[in-house]
Image (cartoon, helix red, strand yellow):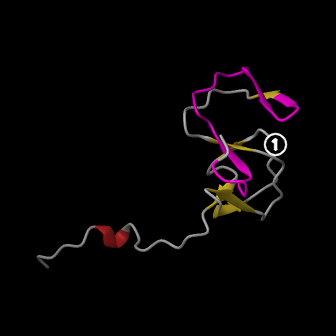
Amino acid sequence: MRLSKADNILVLRRSVLADETLQIGDTKFSLPYDLGLGHKIAARSITEGEKIFKYGAPIGSATCSIQRGEHVHLHNMKSDYLPTYTHDNAFIDNNS
């Protein structure tokens, strides 16, 4: 499912089994692993450093080249958002 015309990723509307045939436009492909509902796959080839768009808004940048139909996740993209807190200050001891 493409959520916006600007998106360069697609969101799976159902779980996909390894080696199941999928199709984007005229291109048929399969993934070597299972993917669950809501996971992202590349709608087209994405170059390293290119912004990744979901809901028509940038959600991160590609950390390497991503081929059409490839799973898009933390192994090949990074968030462009700065954290509002760190793990260290998530547990503040108010009794000290």
On screen, 55 above or below 29?
below
In the rendered view, does 83 fall on the left or right side of 72?
left
In this view, the residue in front, 73 or 90, is: 73
10 falls in the magenta region: yes
Q: Amino acid at mark 1?
A: Arg
Can you give x and y, in whole percent of width and height, for residue 40 in the image? Answer: 64, 43
On screen, 87 above or below 34?
below
Can you give x and y, in whole percent of width and height, for residue 86 in the image? Answer: 41, 71
* Magenta region, residue range: 3-28
Q: Main secondary structure of the magenta part?
A: loop
Residue found 63% across the figure and 49% down from its top: 3
48 falls in the magenta region: no
Picture quarter with the N terminus: top right
In the rendered view, does 82 fall on the left or right side of 19?
left
Residue found 55% across the figure and 39% down from its top: 38
Can you give x and y, in whole percent of width and height, for residue 33 in the image? Answer: 67, 27
Residue identifier under label 1: 68
Q: Quick one: which residue is furthest to the right in this view? A: 26
Q: Quadrant of residue 12?
A: top right
Residue found 81% across the figure and 54% down from its top: 46
Q: How many marks?
A: 1
Can you give x and y, in whole percent of width and height, for residue 5 in the image? Answer: 72, 54
On screen, 43 above or below 94?
above
On screen, 38 above or below 4?
above
Badge 1 marks a residue whose secondary structure is loop
Within 10 angstroms of label 1, few (less than 14), some, or many (20 or more) residues? some
Q: Quadrant of residue 80?
A: bottom right
